[in-house]
Image (tube, helix red, strand yellow):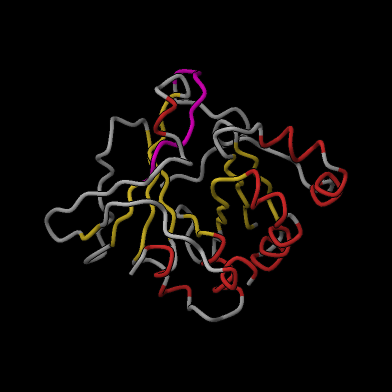
């Protein structure tokens, strides 16, 4: 099964916005909604093609109400997500699965009661060191062609292990070198979520 996770923007209640629309409710009606992290909506689809199609059906809402759209495709990786643009490129065979692991966007997972100023929709930061290359700056814009074209987050009820709800904190953009995944060092976290992105999203 291929999983889709929609990460809500800071200033919206994503689930409420989606369920308030008849069009979005219809698109999601055949799926069971889960919440792996605070203000996220996740569903399981039958394939990467179905996942990309669902995202395309919800495109109007994704552009307005989400900070990120993630796809977990087991044939590519069982524990690292793909950005929507990268999942689309893999589905359309523009990028081979084995070519997806270089450019990363690593989210910290923190208790939702932490300072919300470092949430998923805020400016991304990154660090450099050793054989890992990274870049500071905001999330690079995704081309319209790309739009149209770790941990799996658990199940409903995101938890930090002590029963508290968790959320995604600001991401670290980093390049994987020598097969090693860079460490997330922007703040103390209870977990991390690794997202593979396109070279364009990375800014390379």
Numbered marks: total: 0
In the image, the segment drawn in magenta is 162-171
Identify the residue at horizontal 19%, vertical 59% (top origin).
132
Q: Nearer the viewer, residue 171 or 155?
A: 171
Quadrant of the frame with the N terminus: bottom right
Quadrant of the frame with the C terminus: bottom left
Residue 162 placement, left or right of 145? left
- Residue 74: name its quadrant: bottom right
Q: Nearer the viewer, residue 155 or 59?
A: 59
Q: Percent x, y for residue 25?
A: 83, 44
Q: Percent x, y for residue 70?
A: 55, 53
Residue 158 placement, left or right of 196? right
Q: Nearer the viewer, residue 153 or 107?
A: 107
Q: Nearer the viewer, residue 17 or 178?
A: 17
The correct choice, above or below, for 140 with respect to 94 in the image is above
The correct choice, above or below, for 79 with respect to 148 in the image is above
Residue 25 on the magenta segment: no
The rendered magenta stretch, by its main secondary structure, is classed as strand
Q: Percent x, y for residue 184?
A: 28, 43
Identify the residue at horizontal 66%, vertical 64% (top origin).
52
Q: Percent x, y for residue 183?
A: 25, 46
> Which residue of the protein is positioned furthest toward the bottom in this rendering?
94
Residue 53 placement, left or right of 140? right
């Amino acid at each position: 099964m291929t999983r889709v996770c929609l990460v809500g923007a800071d200033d919206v209640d994503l689930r409420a916005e989606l369920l308030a629309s008849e069009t979005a409710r219809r698109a999601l009606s055949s799926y069971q909604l889960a919440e792996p992290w605070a203000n996220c909506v996740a569903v399981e689809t039958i394939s990467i093609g179905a996942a990309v199609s669902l995202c395309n059906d919800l495109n109007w809402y994704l552009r307005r109400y989400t900070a990120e759209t993630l796809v977990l495709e087991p044939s590519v990786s069982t524990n690292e997500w793909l950005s929507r643009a990268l999942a689309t490129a893999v589905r359309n065979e523009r990028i081979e699965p084995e070519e997806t692991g270089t450019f990363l966007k690593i989210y910290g997972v923190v208790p939702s009661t932490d300072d919300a100023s470092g949430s998923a929709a805020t400016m991304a930061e990154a660090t450099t060191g050793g054989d890992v290359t990274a870049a500071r700056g905001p999330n690079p814009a995704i081309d319209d062609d790309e739009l149209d074209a770790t941990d799996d987050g658990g199940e409903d009820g995101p938890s930090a292990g002590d029963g508290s709800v968790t959320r995604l904190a600001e991401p670290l953009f980093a390049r994987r070198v020598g097969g090693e995944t860079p460490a997330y060092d922007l703040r103390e976290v209870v977990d991390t979520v690794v997202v593979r992105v396109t070279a364009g999203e990375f800014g390379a």
